[in-house]
Image (cartoon, rainbow, N blue to C red):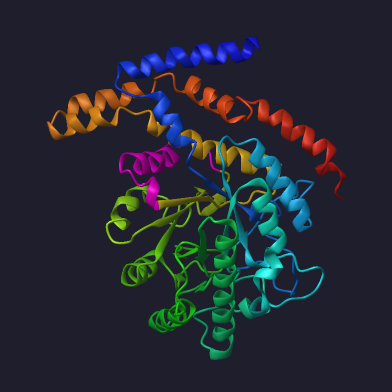
Amino acid sequence: MAKKNNLEAAYQLAKQRYAEIGVDAERALTHLAKVPVSLHCWQGDDVGGFENFGGTLGGGLVATGNYPGKARTPAELRADAEKALSLIPGKHRFNLHAFYGDFGGKKVDRTEIKPEHFTSWIDWAKSIGIGLDFNPTCFSHPNAASGFTLSHPDKAIRQFWIKHCQASREIGAAMGKALGSTTVTNVWIPDGMKDSPADRRGPRERLVGALDEVFKKPLNPKHHLDAIEGKLFGIGAESYTVGMHEFYLGYAVKNQKLVCLDAGHFHPTENMSDKISSVLCFVPEILLHVSRGVRWDSDHVVILNDDLLAIAQELVRGDYLGRTHIGLDYFDASINRVAAWTIGARNMLRALCLAMLEPMDKFKQLELAGDYTSRLALMEEAKSMPFAAVWDYHCLQQGAPVGEQWLAEVKKYEQNVLSQRK
């Protein structure tokens, strides 16, 4: 009780301090509590999935490490995700890849997947009151072994992946309808080449035709939204990526699809946050995959760094949260996987909280008045405001562990559950 009282007292002092600079902390926390983050299934089992057709992971995807206790079944993955969700303040979502279906031990090829293979996932999501998002899985399959899928020169292989993506859209729509929460189905393909190609045009023109077929059937936007995701590079695709950002941006603008901006899919010197306001001038909504690139590798656990803060600030300052679907995308097999989810999601929310506590009206007034000196000074002063007391109070309000208390919960779960998996 004493600790709770201390947290509440600290919050009241912080709330008063923020009020002095024109920020309503209560309003910020009310807003923050309504922002969902979609946790990615592939952190829980190192992008393994629950089918096996003999395909290697491929497509520039590599999960490194062998930390014990990874999920081996849909039920174990759901249990791990539910544990992580209990440690994150707010109500969130879960993002599934197509090869994470509950196939009952049977081999079901990618073109044959149906909503029934995800009934247990829908039932689980309904039982805990969350929404689901979805992705076709265009890797880890013999038909992806060449490094090409929807842009493959062989029409039969190309058609295989078109059918898979069509089936995935139907599953996403079924999820959204069943849960009463719009599912975003995101298409990412690994297509590219290690060395410089002779023909850059052909694969891209084939990809346009394939995407047109994938998206041909209209689906109810209340249940389902389409997103397309570009990438700069990947292992084995260092020189040429068919579906690069500019390709998908053009396609999305022309066809009014969601563009997925992945924080790890651009050159390390690019500022991805600056793309948000640019892209949203031309498409209705966007999907964000929040990741952390380290040198050339794009899939490290999200930390509270300048890049993440810049993303959060752009979303809040531009009033874009209502047009943005936020998801996480990384996979680290060298640490506890439940902790990886928890660290990344809490940091995403922490960054948004910081952004919501900025005196934006004051910043904009100074900017319009041309007083850039005061704007810079106040932006810097805002960095030392008592944010931590507000964040701790938010966790307390939402029934999530405060501070590092969540780590003890993860350690206990590891001892009692994860360590029992052989």
Residue at (54% x, 56% y) in the render: 180
Image x and y of residue 36, in percent: 51, 45
Q: Is residue 347 magenta?
A: no
Image x and y of residue 335, in percent: 70, 42
Q: Is residue 272 visible?
A: no
Q: How many marks?
A: 0
Residue at (73% x, 52% y) in the render: 77
State left or right for residue 399 relative to residue 284.
right
Q: Nearer the viewer, residue 361 or 138?
A: 361
Image x and y of residue 207, in percent: 45, 79
Q: Is residue 322 magenta?
A: yes
Q: Is residue 314 visible?
A: yes
The answer to which quarter of the image holds residue 392 is top right
Q: Is residue 133 above or below residue 373?
A: below
Residue at (38% x, 28% y) in the render: 357
Q: Quadrant of the N terminus?
A: top right
Image x and y of residue 365, in percent: 18, 30
- Which secondary structure class fits the magenta region best? helix
Residue at (42% x, 41% y) in the render: 307
Q: Nearer the viewer, residue 186 or 339?
A: 186
The answer to which quarter of the image holds residue 105 is bottom right
Single out the residue that lies furthest toward the left: 369
Single out the residue that lies furthest toward the bottom: 155
State left or right for residue 232 relative to residue 102.
left
Q: Is residue 123 above or below residue 373?
A: below
Q: Nearer the viewer, residue 42 or 37?
A: 37
Which segment is the magenta one? 302-323
